[in-house]
Image (cartoon, grey):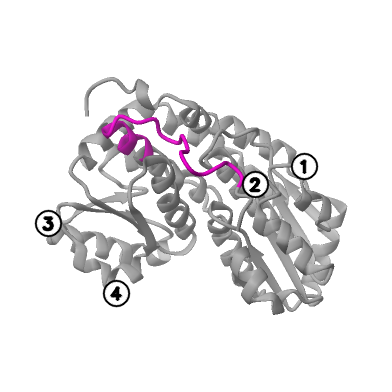
Amino acid sequence: MSGDLSVIEGEYLRDILDQPRALDSTLSKLEASKELRQLARRLQKGSFKSIVLTGMGSSFHALHPLHLELIESGFHSVMVESSELIHYQAGLFDRKNLIVAVSQSGRSAEVVRLLKTNLGRSIIIGVTNTPGSPLAKNAAASVVTDAGEEFSVSCKTYVASLLGLWWLAQTLCGHDLGRIRGDLEGASACAQDYLASWKSHVQHLGDRLRNIRQLFLVGRGSSLAAVGTGSLIVKEAGHFPAEGMSSAAFRHGPFEMVGSETFVGVFAGEKKTRALNRALFQDIRERQGATEWIGEESVFAPFLLPKVPRSVVPVLEILPVQMITLALAALVGREAGRFTFCSKVTTEE
C-alpha cells in the first residue's frame, strides 16, 4: 500500500503509540495492597469456593490469562460476561465466591448494576483504570492501572489491564512478585521496538488485506485474549467484519469459508498447542487460503513477535491486530478509531 497515511494519524494512533509509556507507568504503580494480600491468604486457605471473573468487551477478554493461571494453580475459576452474570447467573453472587470485576472506566452500565445486584454478598476485587470510580470505591480491594486518558477504542488501557491482571494472578496464587515484576519489565521495550515500525507494518498489511472480505483471528489458551479483543477492535476501529474464535472451533464449520477473500490470522500461542495451530495454518495454506502466522517465526514482518516470558505474550499479541485496524481504515480513507455511534464508556445496557 502506498500513499499518504495522514488519514489514520489521529487520536487513536496517538494512544497506540503511547502504550509503552502506559505499560511503564502501570508497572511502576502495581503493588499488593494489605487488603489484596489478605484476600490472597484467604483464597489459599480455601475460604472461597470459586473465583468469578467478569467484565465486558476487551475487559472480559483480558481475563483469559488470569483464568488459566488460577486453574493451573488448583483454584476453581469461571469466566462470565457481566451482562450475563447480573441477569442470568445471579446465583454466583454468593459469600463463598470471590469476584474479580474488570472495567477500564469502572462505571459502565453493567458494572454499576453488578455492584447493586451483589449487595455485599460476594467480596469483589476491582481492576480499573479509574481511581474514584464506583468499582474502585465499592471493591474490597482494587488493582488500579495507570494508562492515562484514552480517546476511544481500547488499546493502552487494555494492555495496562493485562499487566494488572497478571500481577493479580501472581498475588492470588502466592507467587514471587519480585520475579514477576522482572518478567513484566520487558513488556514496554518490546512494544516500543514493534511500534517503531508502525508505518511499515500498516503499509505491508494494506497490501496483504486489500482484497479481503472476511477476517478471522484464531488461537488457543491465553491467545484467546487477543483473539477476542482483536476481533472487537477490528470492528470498532476499522469498521470491518471480523470474528474471533479458538483454532479448534474454526475447524468446526468456518473452515468451509477458506479462500482468497477470507483472511485467517493464526496466533502461535504456547508450545503445548503450537503444533496444532501450525497444522491449521498449513491446512489453510494448502487450500489456497489467505492466512499468516502471528508470533515467533512469522515470515510476515508485521506479525513477527519476539520470544518473551509468557506473562508478556498477551501484551504483544494485540499489537499486530492494532496495525490491522489502521491498515483497514487507511484502505478506505477513514480515520481509525473515531466513533460514529458508540461512546468511550457504555452507559446503557
Which secondary structure lies at badge 4? Answer: loop
**In front here: 179 or 109?**
109
Query: What predominant SS class does the magenta segment belong to?
Result: loop
Q: Position of residue 234 (x, y in %)?
A: 39, 46
Find disc 4 in the rendering and name its residue. 252
- Residue for point 20% across, 68% down: 256
Which secondary structure lies at badge 2? Answer: loop
- Residue for point 56% across, 66% down: 68
Residue 277 visible? The answer is: yes
**In front here: 139 or 268?**
139
Residue 73 visible? The answer is: no
Residue type indicated by callout 3: Gln
Q: How many neighbours does mark 2 have within 10 angstroms: few (below 14), some (14-19), or many (20 or more)? A: many
User: Marks 2 and 4, how far apart in space?
Assistant: 34 Å
Find disc 2 in the rendering and name its residue. 104
User: Marks 4 and 1, how far apart in space?
Assistant: 43 Å
The answer to whether the residue labelled 4 contacts the one labelled 1, judged by CB atoms less than 8 Å apart, is no
**Quarter of the figure with residue 2:** top left
Residue 51 is one of the magenta-drawn residues: no
Who comes first in sequence, dot 2 or dot 4? Answer: 2
On screen, residue 191 versus residue 27, left or right, reads left
Who comes first in sequence, dot 4 or dot 1? Answer: 1
Residue type indicated by callout 1: Pro
Residue 213 shows which numbered tag?
A: none
